Amino acid sequence: MSMDVAPRLDIDVLLDDPQTRIVVCCGSGGVGKTTTAAALGVRAAERGRKAVVLTIDPARRLAQSMGIDALDNIPRRVEGVGGGNGGELHAMMLDMKRTFDEFVEAHADPERARAILANPFYQSLSAGFAGTQEYMAMEKLGQLRARDEWDLIIVDTPPSRSALDFLDAPKRLGSFLDGKFIKVLMAPAKVGGKAGMKFLNVGVSMMTGTVSKVLGGQLMRDVQTFAAAMDTMFGGFRTRAEATYRLLQAPGTAFLVVAAPERDALREAAYFVERLAADQMPLAGLVLNRVHGSGAEQLSAERALAAAEILTLAGDPVDPDDALANATEGSDPAKNGAGAENLANGGFVDPPSGNAQARNPSAADPDVSPTSADSSAERLAAGLLRLHAERMQVLGREQRTHDRFTALHPEVPVAQVAALPGDVHDLAGLRAIGERLAVPPERTSRVAG
């Protein structure tokens, strides 16, 4: 039995707090960040907030869930969310090239902006250079915050192989664009007419000549043209990256680390928690997605398998009640909850009387052989017991994994989200996720079987 109980993350308190202006959902890929961000947006809007969800998920599932044909770089109102309490929900999907173009257009005169946008190196950079997506996600976050049209911005971070990418990539790209390599590429044009810099110019020419052989002459010329056109803007990249970084550290920002109850996902979550603490980022808590449960947790996997084995002993018909009694012999029914333990929900045993249901099917149908009917009932019961055992083993693994995280980070509040039977594909599904996020689990610990 798990004795580690993490403090509960109260999602509604977080969303209702007017001081909370930005919520960042982060974590490894495939753990439900996009669904969590969308569900938070729906719940916040229906509790009176004017919210906008910024997603970077390339699968575009958010648009389908919210009934929007296609999300783009412009926030669009989600119909059917909010209402008389003043709440609204808008949603958008990051178009990193368009965001980069907007940055250029806003910080360069029209003629220079046209030259930059037409440059082949810029087109490659803005479409998929390493770190561009993360940088532009933060750029768009800064733009949304500056517009002050929404009192809550929810960010779905880019899927990445490492938890560090989201925090580091904006600085890396800003440093590159404002760095020594680009400055050196621009040096020939800057020092060419100065007699005192002839020696430097020769050295720079030798370096750029070597780089030209590696990259190719045309690409080298494209890079130099790009660097010359962007000269007046380079300082802005690093400045804006640093400003957004400070915005993420501000008291009005809350990070939610999203994970599934799996070893790799929670290991990544623990790594992210530690990195957020090191960078003084405000962590609200952990959202543990797709947690499995059972209505018969008192019946452990071992006892269910033992009962199933007794039921399937070859050539030895056994009454189901006797099988379960043998499997649980020595236990106190009052402590173990006999009704739930005996699988009343499956219709196997009548809880008040403890008598097996439909023991004598021949009384209802004289053509049915009592022996064959009993055998079929035993096989069915054994199969159900094995299914229950598998579920309890899954619960046990999830609980042990969760306990390891809690042991490492006992101070981190946790919201557990029960697994849904299917994928989320509409507003009703997002509302269901929101309810599971906000409602505390009935039990804070589970018998691990």
Image (cartoon, rainbow, N blue to C red):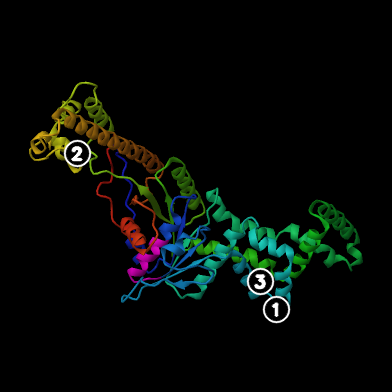
Residue positioned 43% across, 60% down in the render: 37
Residue positioned 20% across, 27% down in the render: 327
Q: CA distance from mark 1 to mark 3?
A: 9 Å
User: Mark 1 is on which residue type?
Assistant: Pro
Q: Dot 2 corresponds to which residue?
A: 343
- Few, some or many C-alpha atoms within 10 Å of disc 1 (few <14, some 14-19, many ≥20)? few
The residue lying furthest to the bottom in this view is: 110
- Few, some or many C-alpha atoms within 10 Å of disc 2 (few <14, some 14-19, many ≥20)? many
Q: Dot 1 corresponds to which residue?
A: 110
User: Mark 3 is on which residue type?
Assistant: Val
- Few, some or many C-alpha atoms within 10 Å of disc 3 (few <14, some 14-19, many ≥20)? some
Q: Which residues are magenta?
A: 38-50
SS of the residue under disc 2: loop
Q: CA distance from mark 2 to mark 1?
A: 73 Å
Query: Taking the image as drawn, is residue 17 in sight?
Result: no
Instruction: State left or right for residue 237 relative to residue 75.
Output: right
SS of the residue under disc 3: helix
Residue 102, image x, y percentages: 62, 72
Judge depth for marks 2 and 3 and give the one in front: 2
**Residue 104 badge:** 3
